[in-house]
Amino acid sequence: MNGPDTGHGSAAGHGPDTGHGSAAGHGSAAGHGSAAGTGTGIGHGPGGSAATVTAAAPLRVLVCGTNFGRFYAEAVRDRPGFVLAGVLSRGSAASRALAERHGVPHHTEVSALPDGIDLACVAVGSAISGGAGTELALALLDRGVHVLQEHPVHLDDMTRCLRLARARGVRYRVHTHYPYVAPVRRFLAAARRLRERQRPLFVDAASPVHLMHPLVDVLGRALGAVRPWRFDEGPTRPGQPFQTVSGTLAGIPLTLRVQNQLDPGDRDNHALHWHRISLGTEGGVLTLADTHGPVLWSPRLHVARDPGHRFVIEGPGTEALERATTSVLGGTGSFRDVFTRLWPDAIGLALDGMRTAVAEHADPLAGAQYDLTVCRIWSALAARLGPPELVRPGPPSPLPVEALFPEHPRPGDAGTDQDGPREPAPASVRPPTGTADGAPYDASAEFFDLVAATHTATASAPAVAALLSGADLSHGPVADIGAGTGLLTQAVARARPDTEVFACEPATGMRAVLTSRVFGDPDLRARVTVTADRAPDVDLPDRLGAVLLCGVLGHLTPEERARLWRELLPRLGPASPVVVELMGLEEPTELAEARTATAHAGRHTYAWWFSGGPDPGEPRAMRLRSTWRVHEEGSAAPVREVSDTHRWWPFGLRTVEEESGLRARLLDTRPGAPPLAVLTKAPAHEQLPFTHDSEDPR
């Protein structure tokens, strides 16, 4: 049942409000904002006249529909490289109010649109859902406007739109949204690494019927392909909430449970749950517990047996028994987080991918084969299930966690991750931004000062304080990007009591210590502003007297570093210094695990172990791993173990000069410490060699 013409009619139950659109790009994270800054795209105005879109020119975006479309409007407003040009709707008071709030025109007819619109986001139900979204998309394409359309879309309509896009020289994509929601991206990144090590043995998945189209896309990305595929014949179970379908996807056995029930007037609120996926291999099971997180890893149980066939659970060779039975990757947030952060962030990635597609001038039909296959599989699946049962239940009664676990803290109380499911877990400095590996690393925040306090006091703080004490900072405040727990922030503020400081730290655990450090000192409290900004998307004053980038740049891709420099350079004065910490990793390197530090407090000893190696999924990057083991007095086995892993993009001093356009020189610091460089717009009086002696960054 994998033919292209199966089951299109039965898919009508897949509604327009919930295909919350994101990048329809192929494979993993397609197109971040900086990637679109190359080349020249052609955007055709509504009247058919071509308007050149250069790398520096923002795309003027029309948002069509204001139900889910309001999330598009928020994403466009906040995304560099895009300008909200207007809102198109039937003319409700809510739509007019949305346009007024954003200060843009409100339109009700495609024929009345002004020239100069480059991209339309069609967040209106398509023909398969009984809406006008498909005809609207066709009308916009016919006028030479690039279109990003909300899923689901009938396979025939998708093909029509792609053919028209080819004829008009514009780009068209269907959005499945959820592959770019942060926890799903985290799952997909882990699935890719898992596939590189072991072949998947099975996939179990579950979804409400109206989110099946994005589910097929997520599964295809998790498996790295969708072909060969098929669905088995067999009895379904009408009258029950879930129906089970078996088959194969990418040649991997698949079991799928679908809630084939639908409230046509309120799809989302009557789904019993959202996407749930388990990907099994010989080594364990990777699970997406919910569309909005968290991700779980459950390694496979394997215990040696003695000659009497008993488990061997003590002695040499049993170290693997210390592994956690299940590890939780990434936090969980509130439903408000979903609406205010996760969905707009995902749409932002969709916009970035569309901007890249516009700049590439590729054939839209030739580049959409994966998307067409996903749509074909979804249609066949809908035919296999049959029409959904229409239900109109009353409002559900969601239970808060404290109803089942009275001791569980409520969201916002101490001990919870108030930032919610930001991108993956870990480390002691900046998380990567705009990648699948970019979450706060609060797991190890409690240990950070055990090592960083000594390093800062003996190396970075004296060097930076000496530099800034004689610097002219009259151009503006100091920005400490990736401030961590505030050790260097505090040292700079004390060295320059006349200067305001902006301390940017996105990780909740690190920022909690930073904020406590600032509030505990009345002088710091008066001059230090703490923000949760993540590089490269930092919100800073227009003028900066100095910038600190210590332990940050390697967490950003080269493209993200380029974006960061574009944000910083216009704010710097002629002599404003930029301090960069170099980690001594200029290319991917294998670092064997070694204990690099030990600290003591009360009856506990804290041992820090560090390792790293080339990232199997990205040849330009490394995977670094920190493990903290807490031992009780006289105990060899740890009583607690906390690990963080993150991606690191190696760079050297010459790379920093080339990317920033600034001149660099090394600062004098403690021998063996990671080197510090200062970059300025003015030529350096003493240009030191680029080679240097430094200790292993572990």
Image: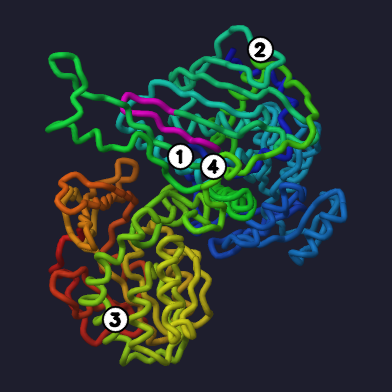
> Could you say which disc has been placed on residue 295 in the image?
1
Residue 44, magenta (yes or no): no
Q: Give the spatial CA distance, label 2 vs label 1.
A: 30 Å
Q: Mark 2 — residue?
A: 237
User: Do labels 3 and 4 touch, CB within 8 Å?
Assistant: no
Name which quarter of the figure residue 310 lies in: top left
Disc 1 crowd, CA 10 A, few/some/many (<14, 14-19, 20+) = many
Q: Amino acid at mark 1?
A: Val
Location of mark 3 (residue): 464
Query: Which of disc 4 and disc 3 is earlier in sequence?
Result: 4
Of the two numbered discs 3 and 1 in the rendering, the one whose residue sits closer to the viewer: 1
Distance, label 3 to label 2, CA atoms, is 69 Å
Q: Residue at x 48, y 71 (%)?
A: 567
Q: Quadrant of residue 464?
A: bottom left
Q: Residue at x 77, y 64 (%)?
A: 101
Residue 581 in the image: x percent, y percent?
28, 70
Looking at the rendering, the stretch of residues picked out in magenta corresponds to 279-290
Q: Which residue is mark 4?
A: 405
Distance CA(mark 3)–CA(mark 1): 40 Å
Residue 6 visible to an observer of this rendering: no
Q: Position of residue 603 (x, y in %)?
A: 22, 58
